[in-house]
C-alpha cells in the first residue's frame, strides 16, 4: 500500500531497538552490571531492515517484549546502586519511557496486521482517503523521529515540539473520521473499508500519544518531577509562545 510502505513499519519498530541500544550502551559504559546482548540487537536490526518478506512478526514482537522485561529488571537493579545525579536522571527517564516504547511496537504490529488484511482482501480506498492517510502518516513519522531524537540526545527543544504535533495528529484523526462518515453516507466507501480505516487511525493516534509521554519524560526529568498530567494541562492551558509557534507550523504542514 502506498500510504504504508516498508519504511513506515521500520521506523516505528526500530524506535524500541534504538532506545534499547542506548540503554545498553550507556549501561556498559558505566559498568553497572554484567554484559548485555547488544549483538542480538544488531542482528535483529538487520533482519527488520533487510527482510523483504515483512518486517514484523510474532518473533520480533516477542523479542521486544523480552527486552522490555530485561531492561525494566536491569533498571530497577540500578536504582539500588550508588549513582551520580546524572545517572539517576537517566535511569528515571528510562523507567518512565520503557513501556511507551514497547507499546509503540505493539501498535506497529497492529498496523502491519491491518495492512496485511487490506492486501489480502484487496480493499481499496478512495483517492481522498488515501491522501488523508498519507498526510497522517507523514505527521506520525515526524513525531516518532522527533521523539526518538529528543530521547537519545536529551534535547529539550525537540521534546517541546512533540506535544504540539501530537495535538495536530489528534485533530487530523478526528477530521478523517468525520470525512469517512461523509464518504460512507455518500456511498463512496464501504463498511469493510471503514473498519480497517478506523483501525489505522486508532493505532496511529496511540503511537502519537506514547510519543507525547516520552517527550514529557525528557522534559520533566530536568525538574525531578514526573507529574505528566500537570505538565500537559499547564502546557495546553498557557499555550506559551513556543507551543503556539510549533502548533501553527505543523498546522500548515499537515493539512488536507
Image (spheres, rainbow, N blue to C red):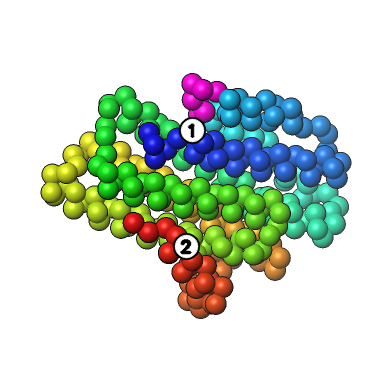
Looking at the rendering, the stretch of residues picked out in magenta corresponds to: 51-58
Q: Is residue 84 above or below residue 29?
A: below
- Residue 194 visible? The answer is no
What element does badge 1 sit on?
Answer: helix
Of residues 124 and 97, which is closer to you in this image? Answer: 124
Look at the image and tell me in which quarter the C terminus lies: bottom left
- The Cα atoms of the two marked residues, 1 and 2, are separated by 25 Å
Q: Position of residue 252 (x, y in %)?
A: 43, 64
What element does badge 2 sit on?
Answer: helix
- Residue 183 visible? The answer is yes
Q: Position of residue 14 (x, y in %)?
A: 59, 38
Other residues around mark 2 within 10 Å, as few (<14) / some (14–19) / many (≥20): some
Identify the image quadrant of residue 172.
bottom left
Q: Is residue 240 above or below residue 171?
A: below
Of residues 121 and 227, which is closer to you in this image? Answer: 121
Other residues around mark 1 within 10 Å, as few (<14) / some (14–19) / many (≥20): some
Looking at this view, name the residue that lies furthest to the left.
Answer: 186
Residue at 35 percent across and 54 percent down: it is: 173
Q: Which mark is residue 6?
A: 1
The answer to if 86 sits in the magenta stretch is no
Residue at 86 percent across and 52 percent down: it is: 82
Return the residue at label 2.
250
Q: Magenta segment, principal secondary structure?
A: loop
Amino acid at each position: 500500500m502506498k500510504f504504508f510502505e516498508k519504511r513506515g513499519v521500520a521506523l516505528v519498530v526500530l524506535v524500541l531497538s534504538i532506545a534499547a541500544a542506548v540503554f545498553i550502551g550507556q549501561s556498559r559504559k558505566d559498568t553497572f552490571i554484567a554484559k548485555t546482548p547488544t549483538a542480538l540487537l544488531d542482528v535483529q536490526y538487520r533482519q527488520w531492515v533487510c527482510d523483504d518478506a515483512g518486517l514484523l512478526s510474532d518473533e520480533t514482537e516477542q523479542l521486544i517484549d523480552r527486552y522490555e522485561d530485561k531492561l525494566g529488571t536491569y533498571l530497577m537493579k540500578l536504582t539500588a546502586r550508588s549513582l551520580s545525579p546524572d545517572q539517576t536522571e537517566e535511569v528515571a527517564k528510562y523507567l518512565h519511557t520503557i513501556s511507551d516504547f514497547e507499546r509503540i511496537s505493539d501498535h506497529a504490529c497492529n498496523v502491519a496486521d491491518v495492512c496485511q488484511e487490506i492486501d489480502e482482501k484487496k480493499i481499496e480506498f478512495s483517492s481522498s482517503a488515501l491522501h488523508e492517510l498519507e498526510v497522517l502518516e507523514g505527521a506520525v513519522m515526524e513525531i516518532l523521529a522527533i521523539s526518538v531524537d529528543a530521547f537519545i540526545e536529551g534535547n529539550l527543544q525537540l521534546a517541546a515540539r512533540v506535544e504540539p504535533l501530537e495535538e495536530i495528529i489528534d485533530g487530523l484523526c478526528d477530521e478523517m473520521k468525520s470525512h469517512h462518515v461523509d464518504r460512507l453516507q455518500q456511498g463512496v466507501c464501504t463498511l469493510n473499508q471503514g473498519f480497517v480505516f478506523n483501525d489505522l487511525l486508532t493505532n496511529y493516534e496511540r503511537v502519537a500519544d506514547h510519543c507525547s509521554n516520552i517527550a514529557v519524560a525528557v522534559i520533566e526529568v530536568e525538574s525531578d518531577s514526573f507529574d505528566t498530567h500537570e505538565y500537559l494541562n499547564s502546557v495546553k492551558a498557557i499555550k506559551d509562545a513556543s507551543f503556539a509557534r510549533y502548533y501553527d507550523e505543523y498546522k500548515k504542514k499537515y493539512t488536507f
